[in-house]
Amino acid sequence: MNANGMTGIPTLTDRYELEEALGEGAIGTVYRAWDRDLGIPVAVKIMHARLTRNTELLRRFADEASLSTRMLSPHVVKVLGLAVTEDDAPCIVYEHLVGETLAARLARVGCMSVAETADVVSQVGRALSRAHAVGVLHRDVKPDNIFLVDQPGGRTLVKLLDFGVAETMDIQGEGSDVIVGTAEYISPEVLFGTARATTRTDVYALGVVAFECLTGACPFPGDHIDDILLGVARGERTSFSVARRDVGCAVHAELEAFFDRAVAAEPADRFASAREMSEALQQIARRRHVDVRQAA
């Protein structure tokens, strides 16, 4: 047994050959690696050594792997195993994905069509539906945690990443009252402490993502986070018709009504589930057959 209490978990270098770093976050760094046993590329998330004495962060890191393995969804990144470094830092081994995050895509193209957005929302919605069905709240749905996997024929497989701040719901279907995640995507009731997180907290975040996909901007504008939070508190959402003046009035009306529900301040006024939200957006895409893409 190692210092972190992990039994039977291999030392990283015994099985995995680290290659280049793919990205770094507050908790750890993700590397591309080679699995010598399986002969395949993988992604390894290694907790920062400086954090390994923090018992709460160690618990969260272990929970990330545990909760991810419960999903059993093609739209959630797969956990392939666990390891520890020679310095006893815990590692999570994920499937290696080829493509880009939704954040990178939006930075590159500006915004997406209604059909493309509906596809992303639908696939993320399936991941959230699975998570919610097994009692898990993601709590950090945002473009950085959504990965667009390249597939033959041009079809994109969408995967939800990073269950690092996810938590299990209690018997009332609620999470904790601790504020976690990224402010722009946290629902008002959680952000301002009026209610605990629920499945509609994740639905709200997905609604913000959908708005960002279609407009390239947050629905609550501001140059600083304080401005954004003030807009959320006042319910001052940017009108879709203002954000996309280049789109026809009929599309404006339908999408305005969609976002009135998707990012409603009151949880009861939102879509009841990620599935209901995705179906509503798919219906708009099918009716309109429009290509809302590059902003004018």
Image: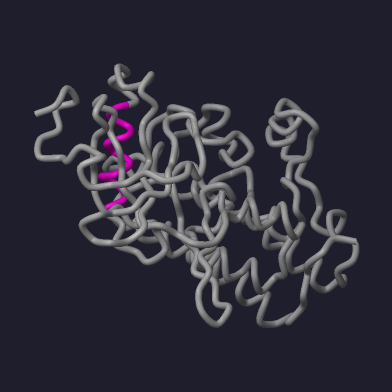
Image location of residue 73, percent across then percent down: 34, 64
The quarter in which the C terminus is drawn is: bottom right
Which range is magenta?
Answer: 58-69
Residue 261 or residue 6, whichever sits in front:
6
Q: Main secondary structure of the magenta part?
A: helix
Please tell me which residue is depicted at 50% across the width and 36% down the height of the picture.
Answer: 24
Image location of residue 180, percent across then percent down: 48, 31
Please tell me whether residue 250 is drawn above or below residue 211 in the rendered image. below
Q: Which of the 4 image quarters holds residue 6?
A: top left
Please tell me whether residue 41 is drawn above or below residue 163 in the rendered image. below
Image location of residue 44, percent across then percent down: 36, 45
Please tell me whether residue 161 is drawn above or below residue 9 in the rendered image. below
Please tell me whether residue 101 is drawn above or below residue 291 in the rendered image. above
Please tell me which residue is depicted at 30% across the width and 50% down the height of the picture.
Answer: 135
Please tell me which residue is depicted at 44% across the width and 51% down the height of the picture.
Answer: 161
Find out whether residue 64 is within the magenta segment: yes
Q: Which of the 4 image quarters holds residue 295?
A: bottom right
State left or right for residue 220 relative to residue 165: right
